[in-house]
Image: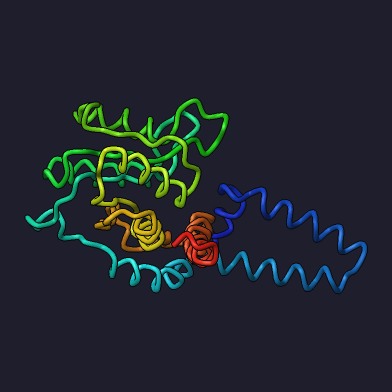
Amino acid sequence: MFRQWLKSLAFGAGTVIPLLFLIVILYLVFRKRQAAGLLAFAGLLAICLITFPGTADLLSRGLLQWSEKWDRPSCLLEPQCQAEAIVVVAGGITNEASLSDWSLVRLQKGMELWHAKKAPLLVLSGGKQNPDFFISEAEALAKEAMRFGIPQKAMLLEQTSRNTYEQAQRTSEILKQHQIKKIVLVTSRFHLPRAAAAFRKAGLETIPVAAIAKGEERMTHPFPSWGNALSVQLILNEYVGFVVYKFLGWL
């Protein structure tokens, strides 16, 4: 395990982090040795904690328990679980305009609900997170949905939002133009509490449904890696995001 951890630190996506850390340490060593030692110890401890297996799982427990209180996993099987639209919240695209894993899983759940006739309309929400991208997240979702047989006339696109709050507000504005008030909201389980609260605040009657990928029972890799650090960042972002949204009155 220790060898895998060292290999991940050296060759993983976070290679630049230990490199910058080393530069700072070398600088401080020549200036203030005591400060350099304290910083080196604190940095090494932080890297060990965020890359170690289990840290993200531990941090995510409260968030996922919270998500379970919102989620309606049995919606597919409940005849009374019906709405006027299914809203899929985008979860990112790549530079090649391909869907991220999060976006693909959310879209698959949304299409599953659409095929189950839970609503006649599929609403795809997400703008351009990067101005250099030539396509919005909603457009990328729509292209993939059409590839799986969803007709264009069964979809509405919201393409100007940059965050969850804007997705809720701008999707609500579009749906109100179509006299739609009740939706099934599809997003990842860690994102569900904040997204559901934001869409309800925007005036939509919301049935939240979590899109869970196969093997997502654990948030971390079984060995220390920078992938674990990304999971920690993702979870902390949700906690902080909820507090900030609440403070700003967006929830």
- Point out residue 10 in the picture as x, y percentages from the top left corner: 62, 51
Among all residues in the image, which is located at the extreme left? 79
11 on left or right of 92: right
For the question of whether residue 232 can be seen, the reply is no
- Viewer-proximal residue among 176 and 73: 176
Q: Residue at x 54, y 60 (%)?
A: 5
In the rendered image, residue 166, in percent from the top left (x then y), is placed at 46, 47
Location of residue 85 by image quarter: top left
Closer to the camera in the image, 232 or 164: 164
With 113 as the anchor, is 33 left or right in this view?
A: right
With 9 as the anchor, is 100 left or right in this view?
A: left
Residue drawn 30% across and 53% down?
204
Q: Please tell me in which quadrant of the rendered image residue 195 appears.
A: bottom left
Q: Give me the residue at 24% from left, 26% from top.
A: 152
Asked whether residue 10 is in view, the answer is: yes
Q: How does the figure colour the protein chain or chains?
A: rainbow
